[in-house]
Amino acid sequence: MDVTVETAKSLGLTADEFVKIQELLSRVPNFTELSIFSVMWSEHCSYKNSILQLKTLPRSGKRLLVGAGEENAGLVDIGDDLGCVFKIESHNHPSAIEPYQGAATGVGGIHRDIFTMGARPIAALNSLRFGTPDSPRMKNLIRGVVKGIGDYGNCFGVPTVGGEVYFMPCYNHDILVNAMSAGIVKAGETVSATAGGPGNPVFIVGSATGKDGIHGATFASADLGEDSHEDLPAVQVGDPFQEKLLLEATLEAITTGAIVGMQDMGAAGITCSTSEMSAKAGCGMRIDLSKVPTRQANMKDWEILLSESQERMLIVVKPGRESEILAVFEKWDLDCAQIGTTIEGDILQYYYEGKLVAEVPADPLVLGGGAPVYIREQKRPEYLQEIEKFDLSQIKTVNHLDAARRLWNSPNLASKNWITQQYDSMVQTATMTTNRPSDAAVVYVKGTRKALVLTTDCNAAYVYADPHKGAMIAVAEAARNIVCAGGDPVAITNCLNFGNPYNPEVYYQFAESIRGMGEACRKFETPVTGGNVSFYNQYTKGGQTVPVYPTPTIGMLGMLDDYEMMMTLDFKHEGDSIYLIGQSREDLSSSEYLRGVLGVEYSPCPYFDLEEEVAVQHVIKKAIARKLIESAHDVSDGGVFANLVESAMPRGLGFEVSSNENIRKDAWLFGEAQSRVIVTVSAEQKANFERFLQTENAAFENLGEVKGTVISVDGENWGAVTEWARTYETTLSQIMND
């Protein structure tokens, strides 16, 4: 077929990019070659609209061994000759079209990024965003996503140990499904995604190749519209049992010493893995697509190249050691076929049935090579003017108990057990937080006294209100959660979910979020190890576009050098004193109370000061190290009241507290001003604790004490803890079962 600029546009390329491709090739590309450029130059693969912004983030640190963009995932040193490989990525568009397979293959893909580097995955987390869960369509999406995550992870045998779930109207069409994985690798056993040099055999291993996922990267780099259901073939199909075999086979193959390099076949399939491995090594490849095992007859050459069929790897092997690799994969009953060799020069040659069907240079296809990069126009969003009009004095107070009950019925605050009970959190028997509630997941590293401390965090309402400050808060809250669990923050991975980058207001949100994230990461000394950017999360209908709230999700890794120093959030003993570390503020901005109970859409980001945050976390670290406190729980969604109830429920212990007379009561109860942690202290340690706080010059309030089984606020009986727990446990399940 004749290839024209219209062909290029139909594949998601621009007219200027089509011209650039012709200049690189010194000719007009054929359809297969154009298809290669269309997927590799899509936003999903090339980061063409984001990479220059991403390069401003901190990318080095004392524990960092592999940073952003260097390999399939980040790698940090955790001591004892061990490393932790971790990463978070999105699978948003596929999950919106086919929620079960979209979410399942998101989980499978992120785990492959981990074991491709030689690490065994030991923990999974997720960050999910849904619309209001009261419509049949949204309930089906929620059910499909949750079942997809649960089925894949449970069958694959990696525990889902943590995450977050939000329900907001801005996600009524475009849901967000972000999946995170962390694994452990021994020093010297990591594998690089490189082709090595000329003369190395190239193998495809794992599942056979089908037509699922073709142009998936391009699909993920465009808006969803009214006819997006027609893109269902772009959604991959997963098989967790096959992935389990692939995990064991690849880890065994690594021990042979015969592997030069290995890369997961994720977005763009064979195209991406061959080009990236070649570009990294400075060599080319000669690939015979006819030798690729397929599960469908009569597949075209470009379909084989672009397929995103799951559970596949590209492996480059040392010459003469092919039989060792073949034996390993035969043992695990997996396809293993030599499909080519590495060659001299920066050239990729793809043959099919004896015919050269595509010949393109490797380097210009990949990030850092000749792929286009852009800085888009920015414009401060007009809605921020509405936010600036907010006046707290105009917010009338309501009956506080009634408000608390309405707030407690919010699905954003309710227990997510309806979701998490579908996940296996105990497989591998290393999860320490299944029955010991904590602000972050704690996973024991077997054979050591160490534990990983993991969390995903982002309140998109804060980022919408102030992209710069909201992104800083996302990093700070992740660090605060890890500190409250007893850990030290080490590094982050991010999943940056935004609307269309060609929209100047969206690009402003993106650029400001990157700026805030960078400032906070530098302050906490948590370098960015990688992640992904997911643009085009917006719905177009009747000429109107509705982007999601900017959602820069932070996946943070922390470390506990001694797992016995883990801290939990539950009240321990009647008579323990309750303290607020940090300062109460006259602030209701962007709170769940303001949005969910009072229906106020536009309000500023809650109070946040980076220096205060660092100081509070420093105090909490010291208090835990000195064993001065019994529990720690950061104040976040729902404010002080929600925090107290969450700490009361695990053991059914009540509390008596008095509000701060200098703060309006609804702000004290429900405000979400940052840099605050609630701790409990035994009677024996109370005097020592207060002396410690005075020595640290820390702001604090003595709120009251753990007492009985009833909640008492300012002397008013607000009911038994069991009643609040019943509402907490049943709200979401009732919504989903109606």
Image: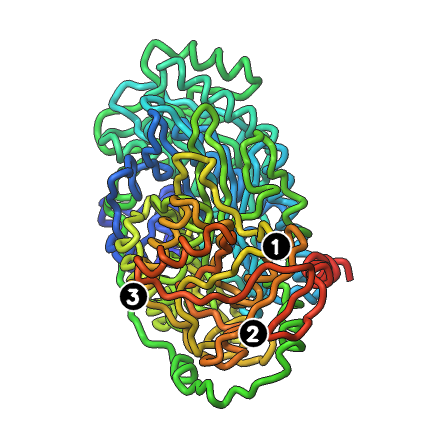
Nearer to me, 11 or 109: 109
Q: Nearer the viewer, mark 1 or mark 3?
A: 1
Q: The disc labelled 3 sits on which kind of residue?
A: Arg
Q: Quadrant of residue 469?
A: bottom left
Disc 1, disc 3: CB below 8 Å? no
Query: In x, y percent, where is residue 148?
Result: 63, 44
- Residue at 22 percent of width and 45 percent of height: 26
- Mark 2–mark 3 distance (CA, rounded to whole Å): 36 Å
Q: Is residue 139 visible?
A: no
User: Secondary structure beneath disc 2?
Assistant: helix
* Secondary structure state at the residue bearing disc 3: loop
Distance CA(mark 1)–CA(mark 3):
58 Å
Residue marked by disc 3? 376
Say which residue label 2 marks.
593
Can residue 409 be seen here? The reply is yes
Task: Please indicate whether residue 574 sits to the left or right of residue 606 in the image.
Answer: right
Q: Which residue is mark 1?
A: 574
Residue 685 placement, left or right of 143: left
Crowding near pointer 3: few (<14 within 10 Å), some, many (20+)?
some
Q: Earlier in the sequence, mark 2 or mark 3?
A: 3
Query: Could you tell me residue 423's position as x and y percent?
Result: 63, 42
Indicate the quadrant where residue 662 lies: bottom left
Q: Quadrant of the C terminus?
A: bottom right
> Comparing marks 2 and 1, which lies closer to the viewer?
1
The disc, 1 or 3, on the residue closer to the chain's N-terminal end is 3
Q: Position of residue 540 (x, y in %)?
A: 52, 69
Residue 700 location, x and y as percent?
Answer: 41, 65
